[in-house]
Amino acid sequence: IDVSGDLENKYNFPSSEPRAKHTVKIRAADARIPQWSSWSEPVEF
């Protein structure tokens, strides 16, 4: 396991096997206001 020295909590689990990539887009809403935010930029992991 590689742990970066940044302030963020990032962990890298190197693997010799290829893994599928996933892409996610997120949006949020407030329960008091029935309006959704814009979609975020796609994030691949």
Image (cartoon, helix red, strand yellow):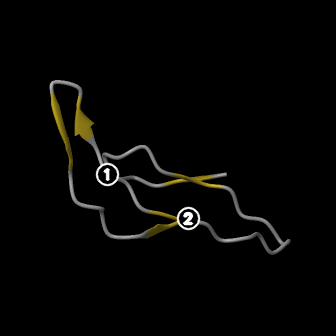
Q: Nearer the viewer, residue 25 or 19?
A: 25
Q: Nearer the viewer, residue 33 or 14?
A: 33
Percent x, y of residue 16? 83, 72
Tell me if 10 is positioned left or right of 34 in this view.
right
Label 2 and label 1: CA atoms lie apart by: 17 Å
Helix, strand or loop for disc 1: loop
Locate the C terminus by quadrant.
bottom right
Tell me if 1 is positioned left or right of 5 in this view.
right
Foreground mark, 2 or 1, reads 1
Compared to residue 31, the image places residue 29 above or below, namely below
Percent x, y of residue 3? 53, 51
Which of the numbered marks, if any, corresponds to residue 45?
A: 2
Outermost residue to the left: 33
Percent x, y of residue 11? 55, 50
Which of the numbered marks, if any, corresponds to residue 27?
A: 1
Number of callouts: 2
Tell me if 16 is positioned left or right of 3 in this view.
right
Q: Please state which amino acid type lies under the numbered disc 2.
A: Phe
Compared to residue 35, the image places residue 44 above or below, namely below
The mark that comes first in sequence, 2 or 1, is 1
Compared to residue 21, the image places residue 2 above or below, namely above
Percent x, y of residue 24? 49, 62
